[in-house]
Image (cartoon, grey):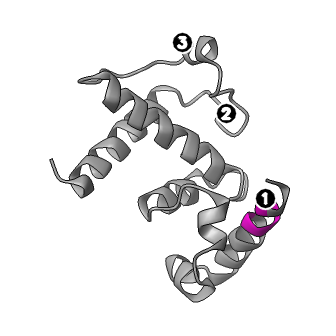
């Protein structure tokens, strides 16, 4: 399977996982400690590698949630789909290229970029 197809499949699995766990606030969820991961409604994976890839995407999704406005999970997913997985990645992307993702709402893009820069300074 091509890298692009694998990425798309993993993103689809992440979306199903998120739908199955809608009641969880992943902005605050502990995704680092294995015992806490057992309480979620997991989907079936074909192997451990696939589960690891989806878990890594979930962690990236959490990082994106922390830089987008509350309630804008759609923006966090859009960033993931665009290949962004951290504030460092966002900050290291040329401003003009990053803001292309927000052509419909440039102000939102500027706010996300500003928040990514603030988070980047903390990390």
Give me the residue at 72% from left, 52% from top: 70
Label 3: which residue?
A: 38
Label 1: which residue?
A: 119
Give me the residue at 60% from left, 27% from top: 23
Asked if residue 48 lies left or right of residue 19, the reply is: left
Quadrant assignment, res 33 = top right
Q: CA distance from mark 2 to mark 3?
A: 16 Å
Foreground of the two, 103 or 31: 31
Dot 2 or dot 3, earlier in sequence:
2
Task: Note whether 56 is above or below 110 in the view shown.
Answer: above
Residue 99 coordinates in the image, percent (x, y): 58, 81
Residue 56 coordinates in the image, percent (x, y): 49, 38
Q: CA distance from mark 3 to mark 1?
A: 29 Å
Q: Main secondary structure of the magenta part?
A: helix
Dot 1 lies on which element?
helix
Label 2: which residue?
A: 25
Callout 1: 10 Å neighbours few (<14), some, many (20+)?
some
Determine contact: label 3, label 1, CB under 8 Å.
no
Asked if residue 39 lies left or right of residue 83, the reply is: right
For the magenta stretch, what is the residue range? 116-120
Dot 2 lies on which element?
loop
Task: Note whether 50 is above or below 79 in the view shown.
Answer: above
Q: Nearer the viewer, mark 2 or mark 3?
A: 3
Give me the residue at 60% from left, 79% from top: 105
Residue 19 coordinates in the image, percent (x, y): 45, 33
Q: Does 108 lie within the magenta span? A: no
Task: Note whether 116 is above or below 74 in the view shown.
Answer: below
Q: Which mark is residue 87?
A: none
Q: CA distance from mark 1 to mark 2?
A: 19 Å
């Amino acid at each position: 399977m091509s890298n692009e197809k694998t990425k798309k499949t993993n993103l689809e699995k992440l979306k199903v996982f998120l739908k199955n766990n809608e009641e969880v606030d992943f902005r605050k969820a502990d995704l680092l400690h294995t015992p806490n991961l057992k309480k979620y409604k997991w989907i079936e994976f074909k192997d451990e590698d696939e589960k690891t890839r989806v878990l890594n995407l979930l962690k990236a999704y959490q990082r994106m949630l922390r830089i987008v406005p509350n309630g804008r999970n759609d923006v966090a997913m859009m960033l993931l789909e665009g290949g962004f997985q951290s504030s460092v990645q966002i900050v290291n992307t040329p401003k003009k290229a990053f803001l292309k993702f927000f052509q419909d709402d440039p102000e939102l893009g500027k706010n996300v970029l500003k928040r990514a820069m603030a988070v980047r300074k903390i990390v």
